[in-house]
């Protein structure tokens, strides 16, 4: 029987998709454009210029933001590396170690940071560190970031591991490879795309975090988001738009990178 | 030779049997010690007495929950009345988060369907376009929204320059701005899980429905929606839960009049004016609401046989 209509098509869905993308991108694009505005006021357009980028790197607030950026980057790097390692171990345990007691519970535990609202995690962590008398600062931020980065690193790693058949390692073991060799020489190289995207996503998540960092950072240390937030409290200044544009580009390029790595990984394994 | 007996091609293999508990140890240590234990401690703190310069006195007290529910007058000796301030803030948060969820679903479902029914490279590109804002810093996205809808912001400027309006529309610091912020923040969270669900949808079902003379919309209601329900529920949870505890959107876009749970909690820990046990109690109540929402989620997933 000839069909009267295309079952996959619904009238108006294309328009709604375009509306969705329009809504998602307009605020970002407007801020990007206005970051090149050569005017002291953020409202009036005064022609194109790079002066606010110059301000970001060499202006009066530059040392503050550079220090905050350094903190953000080093914390993100440490937190993402640690979280990725922990997540990889957990993925091997859950997907490659047969069945054992507590497996389901452990899976829930790994995803727990995703389920507890951020503000609750922030309050709980603050109370905990204050109760045990741990001084708030760089270390508290780093620990808190590792915790909530674990599930984000875990998701792509587990997804990738599920796509790799166990027979590869079995073949290696049949050829007298030890379990460690089967892991290092067979599973690990196959896992690389998943590990890299897990790391990149954990890195971005750590770099982006505001609420938890704001609670556990203590006085005297800032990350980029908390420094930006403090600055915005006194009104949006053009240099904030320049910083925002730069951060936006960093996030976008990381996602693009992760996307290409995943695609390439997908082609190799298929 | 471990693992040889295993049937080949099985994803869930047991090459590393015996190492499971050891490999899970770091996760248990880190998350158990720095998340589970702190949440337990928060529960204890919510039953302690507040100290006036922030922090607590180790003395059991129900004052935090009492303050949340009852008004006992300025000196605490009036007969208790129901205190509506905090219940009101919670109610407003639930309402705002619920509305954001519905709006995200109305825009998100068609988007997810449209993307999932593209073919080849087109699909990847559309999906990629939706994913990028998902990873852009939430603070920056909220600031962008604030910039856009200010009284002297681009939207008002353009509308006035175009002669559509003569006075700027006041949008910032209203409940509308908070709603817009929540919707904008969490929209990608709705699209992605629904997309994943539609990807797994068997289009032969739609074809069967069409062959039996079901119209497009009948098919959508009676065949497609029930099939992709797990994705829809997941998307709703992913929008509702973070919206409920949102801090940035109400704080930056809503101002003092549009307090939500997140701002209420944050205020209890800021400087010396705070009240830690009350903040802990409010956090516990928020966590309970979220757990209830998650239980509904788990139940709907089990009904669908996804467990």
Image (cartoon, coloured by chain):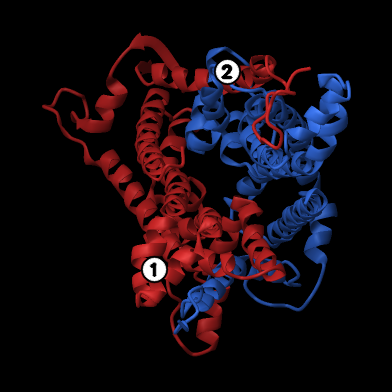
Chain colours: A blue, B red
Task: Give residue B207's position: percent from left, percent from top.
Answer: 45, 71
Q: Are marks 2 and 1 in contact (CB under 8 Å)?
A: no
Q: Is residue A72 above or below residue B36?
A: below
Task: Give residue B220's position: percent from left, percent from top.
Answer: 39, 68
Q: Is residue A99 above or below residue A121?
A: above
Q: Nearer the viewer, residue A237 or A105?
A: A105
Q: Quadrant of the N terminus of chain B?
A: top right
Residue at position x 59%, y 29% in the image = A216
Q: Residue furthest left?
A: B79
Relative to residue A242, is residue B85 drawn left or right?
A: left
Task: Give residue A163's position: percent from left, percent from top.
Answer: 70, 43
| Residue for badge 2 | A100
> Between marks 2 and 1, how big is the CA–CA gap?
42 Å
Q: Nearer the viewer, residue B221 or B277?
A: B221
Q: Residue furthest bottom?
A: B163
Q: Is residue A68 above or below residue B178?
A: above
Residue at position x 61%, y 35% in the image = A151
Same chain for mark 2 and mark 1? The answer is no
Numbered disc 2: secondary structure: loop
Numbered disc 1: secondary structure: helix
Relative to residue B23, is residue B281 drawn left or right?
A: left
Q: Is residue A141 visible?
A: no
Sort mark 2 into few (<14), some (14-19) or many (20+) by Cα contacts within 10 Å. few
Q: Nearer the viewer, residue A133 or B137?
A: B137
Q: Check residue B121 in the rendering and tell me which mark sits there, or answer none.
A: none
Task: Give residue B167's position: percent from left, percent from top.
Answer: 43, 80
Relative to residue A25, is residue A70 drawn left or right?
A: right
In the rendered structure, the residue with mark 2 lies on which chain?
A: A
Sort mark 1 into few (<14), some (14-19) or many (20+) by Cα contacts within 10 Å. some
Residue at position x 36%, y 39% in the image = B299
Q: Is residue A111 visible?
A: yes
| Residue for badge 1 | B220
């Amino acid at each position: 029987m000839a069909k009267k209509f295309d079952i996959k098509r619904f009238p108006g869905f294309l328009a709604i998709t375009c509306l969705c993308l329009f809504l998602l991108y307009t605020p970002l694009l407007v801020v990007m454009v206005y970051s090149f505005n050569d005017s002291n006021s953020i409202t009036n357009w005064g022609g194109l210029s790079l002066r606010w980028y110059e301000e970001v790197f060499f202006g009066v607030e530059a040392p503050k933001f550079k220090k905050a950026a350094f903190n953000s980057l080093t914390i993100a790097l440490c937190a993402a590396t640690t979280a990725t390692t922990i997540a990889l171990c957990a993925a091997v345990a859950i997907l490659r170690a047969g069945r054992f007691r507590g497996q389901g519970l452990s899976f829930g535990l790994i995803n727990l940071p995703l389920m507890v609202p951020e503000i609750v995690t922030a309050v709980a962590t603050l109370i905990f560190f204050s109760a045990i008398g741990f001084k708030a600062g760089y270390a508290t931020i780093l620990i808190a970031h590792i915790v909530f980065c674990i599930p984000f690193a875990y998701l792509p790693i587990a997804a990738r591991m599920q796509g790799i058949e166990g027979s590869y390692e079995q073949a290696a073991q049949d050829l007298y490879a030890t379990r460690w060799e089967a892991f290092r020489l067979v599973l690990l190289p196959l896992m690389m795309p998943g590990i890299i995207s897990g790391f990149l996503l954990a890195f971005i998540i750590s770099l982006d975090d505001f609420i938890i960092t704001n609670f556990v950072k203590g006085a005297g240390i800032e990350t980029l988001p908390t420094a930006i937030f403090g600055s915005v409290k006194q009104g949006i200044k053009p240099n904030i738009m320049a910083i925002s544009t730069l951060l936006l580009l960093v996030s976008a390029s990381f996602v693009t990178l992760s996307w290409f790595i995943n695609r390439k990984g997908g082609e190799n394994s298929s | 030779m471990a693992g040889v007996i295993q049937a080949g091609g099985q994803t869930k293999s047991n090459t590393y049997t015996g190492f499971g508990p050891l490999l899970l140890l770091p996760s248990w240590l880190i998350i158990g010690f720095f998340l589970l234990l702190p949440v337990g401690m928060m529960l204890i703190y919510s039953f302690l007495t507040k100290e006036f310069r922030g922090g607590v006195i180790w003395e059991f007290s129900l004052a935090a929950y009492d303050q949340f529910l009852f008004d006992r007058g300025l000196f605490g000796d009036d007969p208790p009345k129901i205190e509506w301030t905090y219940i009101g803030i919670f109610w407003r948060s639930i309402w705002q988060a619920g509305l954001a969820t519905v709006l995200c679903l109305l825009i998100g479902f068609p988007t997810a369907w449209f993307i999932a029914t593209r073919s080849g490279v087109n699909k990847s590109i559309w999906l990629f376009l939706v994913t990028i804002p998902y990873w852009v810093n939430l603070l920056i996205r909220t600031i962008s929204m604030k910039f856009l809808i200010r009284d002297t912001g681009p939207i008002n400027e353009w509308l006035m320059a175009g002669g559509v309006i003569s006075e700027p529309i006041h949008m910032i610091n209203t409940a509308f701005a908070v709603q817009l912020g929540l919707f904008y923040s969490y929209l990608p969270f709705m699209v992605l899980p629904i997309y994943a669900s539609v990807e797994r949808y068997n289009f032969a079902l739609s074809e069967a429905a069409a062959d039996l003379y079901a119209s497009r919309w009948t098919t959508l209601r009676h065949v497609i929606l029930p099939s992709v329900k797990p994705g829809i529920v997941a998307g709703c949870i992913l929008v509702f839960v973070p919206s409920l505890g949102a801090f940035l959107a109400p704080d930056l876009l809503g101002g003092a009049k549009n307090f939500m749970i997140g701002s209420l909690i944050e205020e209890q820990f800021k400087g010396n004016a705070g009240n830690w046990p009350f903040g802990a109690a409010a956090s516990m109540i928020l966590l309970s609401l979220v757990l209830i929402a998650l239980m509904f989620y788990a139940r709907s997933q089990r009904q669908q046989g996804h467990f």
